[in-house]
């Protein structure tokens, strides 16, 4: 009986030695996943809030410096890395034709294809309503704390927010 107790204590130590690195690897991977998720949420929020700021009026929409500053202020001190994200601001437009929705029902709502807003459409003359949007993109490179085999150590987090100018 005494030998069994002694062997079981030694067996528990061997099991712990074998399992502990695997458990620690899972903890580190979960921690890095939480970090990348957090930075993604911060980037999304910064792009959204900056686009909302620019969408307040046409005057705000043309002030790209203020929109960029708003996005950078939203991420200030919240990113794990020391580099600020790259912020791109664009004023994009599209010509909207309300006749596209004249015969739309729930059954065929997915069949209506609206044109994507572009910067070139802002200078074009529209026969119908001109819709103006502010588009803000934040780009940031996430760097993992450790280098895991088979998992990239750094990758890009890009978020785009487009809001219609009121």
Image (cartoon, rainbow, N blue to C red):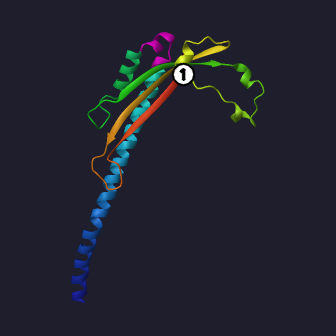
Count of marks, rendered view: 1
Q: Quadrant of the C terminus?
A: top right
Could you tell me which residue is drawn at 28 percent across and 37 percent down?
A: 81
Residue that badge 1 annotates = 118
- In this orientation, which residue lies closer to the viewer: 158 or 1? 158
Magenta stretch, main secondary structure, is helix
The image quarter containing residue 20 is bottom left
Picture coordinates of residue 24, whole percent (x, y): 29, 59
User: Where 32 sits versus 14, above or below?
Assistant: above
Is any atom of residue 142 visible in this view?
Answer: yes
x and y, in percent, of residue 137 in the image: 43, 28
Check the picture and name the quadrant holding the N terminus: bottom left
Q: Position of residue 82 (x, y in %)?
A: 26, 33
Give the residue furthest to the bottom: 1
Q: Nearer the viewer, residue 53 or 86?
A: 86
Residue range highlighted in magenta: 53-63
Quadrant in which residue 4 is drawn: bottom left
Residue plotted at (42% across, 13% down): 63
Residue at the image point whose x is 31% and y is 29% from the top: 84
- Is residue 116 a member of the stretch shown in magenta? no
Kindly tell me whether residue 166 is visible in this rendering: no
Does residue 30 appear to the left or right of 5 in the view shown?
A: right
Residue at horizontal 45 percent and vertical 19 percent from the top = 53
> Is residue 50 left or right of 75 when viewed as pictured?
right
Q: Is residue 89 above or below residue 153?
A: above
Regarding mark 1 in the picture, which secondary structure is present there? loop
Give residue 101's position: percent from left, percent from top: 73, 25
Q: Residue 107 falls in which quadrant of the image?
A: top right
In the depicted view, which residue is nearer to us: 59 or 151?
151
Image position of 80 with respect to 126: above or below = below
The residue carrying pointer 1 sits among few (fewer than 14), some (14 to 19) or many (20 or more) residues within 10 Å by Cα, namely: some
């Amino acid at each position: 009986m005494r030998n069994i107790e002694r062997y079981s204590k030694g067996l528990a130590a061997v099991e712990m030695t074998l399992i502990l690195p695997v458990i620690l690897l899972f903890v580190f991977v979960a921690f890095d996943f939480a970090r990348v998720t957090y930075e993604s949420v911060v980037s999304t929020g910064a792009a959204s809030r900056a686009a909302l700021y620019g969408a307040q009026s046409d005057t705000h929409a043309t002030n790209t410096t203020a929109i960029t500053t708003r996005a950078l202020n939203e991420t200030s001190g919240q990113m794990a890395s020391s580099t600020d994200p790259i912020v791109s601001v664009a004023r994009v437009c599209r010509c909207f034709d309300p006749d596209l929705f004249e015969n739309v029902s729930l059954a065929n709502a997915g069949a209506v294809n609206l044109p994507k807003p572009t910067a070139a459409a802002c200078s074009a003359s529209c026969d119908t309503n001109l819709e103006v949007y502010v588009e803000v993109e934040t780009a940031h490179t996430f760097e993992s704390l450790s280098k895991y085999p088979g998992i990239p150590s750094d990758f890009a987090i890009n978020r785009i927010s487009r809001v219609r100018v009121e």
